[in-house]
Image (cartoon, grey):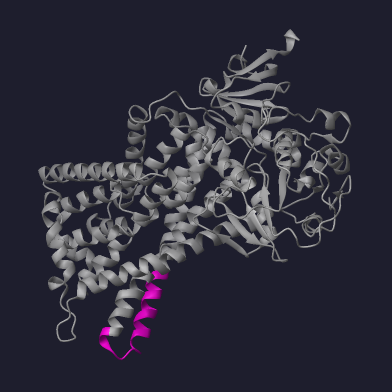
Amino acid sequence: MHLAELKHGEKATVLGVAQGEAYCHLCALGLNAGAEVEVVRTLSRRTVLIVRVDGFDIALRGETASTVKIRMESAL
Amino acid sequence: MSTATVIAVEKSAPARPAGTYHTIGLIGPPNVGKTTLFNRLTGLRQKVSNYSGVTVEHRSGKLKSGQTVIDLPGVWSLTPESEDQKIAVNVLHGAQPGVPKLDAVLLVVDGTALHRYMGLIHEVLACGLPTMVLINMADELVARNGYIDPLAVARELGSPTALISASRGTGMEAISHFLNGEHAAAQILPVLQAGGNAAPGCATDCNTLTRSGAYRRPHHSKFTRAFDRWALHPVVGPLMCIFFIAAAFQIMFRLAYPAGQWLSTWLGNIGIAAGEHIPDAILRAIIVDGIWNGIASILGFLPTILCMFLVITLLEDSGYMARAAVIADRTMGHVGLNGRSFLPLLSAYACAVPAIMATRAIPSKRDRLATILIAPFMTCSARLPVYALLIAAFIPQRKVLGNLLGLQAVTLMLLYAVGLLAALFTAKLLHSSVLKGRASMFAIELPNYRMPRLRTVALAIYDRSMVFLKQVGTVILVLNLAIWFLSHMPFHNGQPSDVGASYLARLGDVIQPLLHPLGLNRNVGISLLGAFVARESVVSTLATLYGQVNVGDALRAEIGLAGAIALLVFFALAMQCTATLAVVRRETNSWKWPLLQFAYMTILAYGASFATYRIALAMHL
């Protein structure tokens, strides 16, 4: 499952970021393995997600978010 | 912890004699107050080697003690992901041409999100230079219920660590202790091998520190969350963004532009008054008409440029700019760009040169190039005097839309729209041709809102003014003189010749055939040639060419409304700025892009201008 699939209000744990253009940038924004994420807002039909990562908010495009692998909290 | 000054040193090593750190690098991620700290450390003893973006350009300054501090571009990791990071990494490794090797490093991180910077901290420490870790915004961390034990952090990192507040100036003495070698640089633990395979920024987390109780994360501020509810709202958000931009333009047109006009008239009058004390007529003409009047007319739009940068700095320092980028991302996405291009394009309304410098913060190479190529279409402030002149001369002061707007204001808005549409069209064109590729990535941090710091804003404005005044004092001065001489030479018996018989007039005759299809005359052609060096010089060149006659009246008689509209369109679209071409050449590191850009924009401008002229004639304008 990846971050772009997460619905508004759902929480998950980051498993890792796929290698690619956005890799380092996303890690630097706090999307490291183990980080807790929650989608707090979606903009313009989910083209942009506002994601709370360890208590801080970041904004990212849906396509970019799809490179972040996650695991739902409930599945833990 | 109110003063938040703790210097923690673990594992004492032999102290270096005082003053042996000659060159000190200041490194850290963007938006952690690195620039604020740099300004506080160096005051006005700074040297900006070029036009600077906020944390984009690499600047150096002197400490009171005479040591040199180099402000490195903001980086998230030492993996060269963008131009900024490449430069930072090179400087850190002593491999950047023209930059001395560093003796010590000050690493600034944001204490309110320490866990995110652990990767960078370890990478920098692994470079092996004496490093002090500065945990900034310590006051904010405490205010928001966070906690940090600097001694434990220092022990964990094996490096001197201090809590500071760059904006309040606390913790500065710890820095000078470290830089003067009064405290031993702790032995650096090889935490991460430099250049190792470990994923940078991802390998380490803050778990040890959190577990040991040395660090407790604060909460995202309540105000930030509450405000973001509106700032990122699907309807209110874009309206808010438009409101801020509209307010910026209102201030620019209602206050800054008239103030500038007044300034330039006032300076012009001073020149005339002072000129009466110069006995020699030719010398007086050279000094007053050739030098002073040109400078006076150009200084007149310093307030406009500064006003635009004031607004941009305020929006950026307050944290709002990241939200604006998110809001703009959707629109940008339609033409293959992303929200990160928003700030550079907004800056381009003031001047394309710093805007192009600001594109360095865009991680994707392709997006960056596209932004560079379209930035000069945005209506920069140097176009304004020309628009103002032509609009005042040709467009009647009539009310339209039920007395809501003046026809002149509508015309000006249309010209801004022409530039913006050309930029978006070009971005789309680039995206589907030379810069084809996958949709670009976009991810941006939404920092906490904070009150813009007076000091940061004031220094940014000071920086801008200096860059502008330098330009006026050199390039524009020389150009004005050159045009004056060309329009008065050859001398006959020591008397300057008429403009009509001058070298400049002959040059005008050469380009006349090209301009005829656009309905433009020789004088306009000459002024357009001068505009290549400085767009705004069109007004002063025309004033020189028409002598004492009112330029507006002269143009009305000679080119007519159709010609004026054609000229406006040409001016809105043409790449007439050598400074921009030079900076594009430098930023893209090739002649290919600036030349392509020049050819494209000139052809587009000529074609659009020709079409406009023909349509205007057909409508009997």
Q: Quadrant of residue B378?
A: top left
Q: Which residue occupies the foreground of this view, B554 or B460?
A: B460
Q: Residue furthest top?
A: A75
The magenta span reads B263-282
Residue drawn where x is 79% and y is 45% of the image: B138
| Rendered view: A19 above or below B367 | above
Residue drawn where x is 59% and y is 14% of the image: A5
Q: Residue furthest bottom?
A: B279
Rendering coords of residue B426 (x, y %)? 33, 35
Rendering coords of residue B340 (x, y %)? 51, 36
B268 is within the stretch colored magenta:
yes
Residue drawn where x is 19% and y is 75% of the image: B489
Q: Quadrant of residue A31?
A: top right
Give the prevailing secondary structure in the magenta stretch: helix
Is residue B372 rendered to the left or right of residue B317? Answer: left
Where is the N terminus of chain A found, in terms of image quarters?
Answer: top right
Rendering coords of residue B524 (x, y %)? 20, 60
| Rendered view: B254 above or below B331 | below
Q: Quadrant of residue B170?
A: bottom right
Where is the C terminus of chain A found, in terms of image quarters?
Answer: top right
Q: Which residue occupies the foreground of this view, B252 or B536?
A: B536
Rendering coords of residue B330 (x, y %)? 47, 29
Counting labels gives 0
Observer able to see residue B452 = no
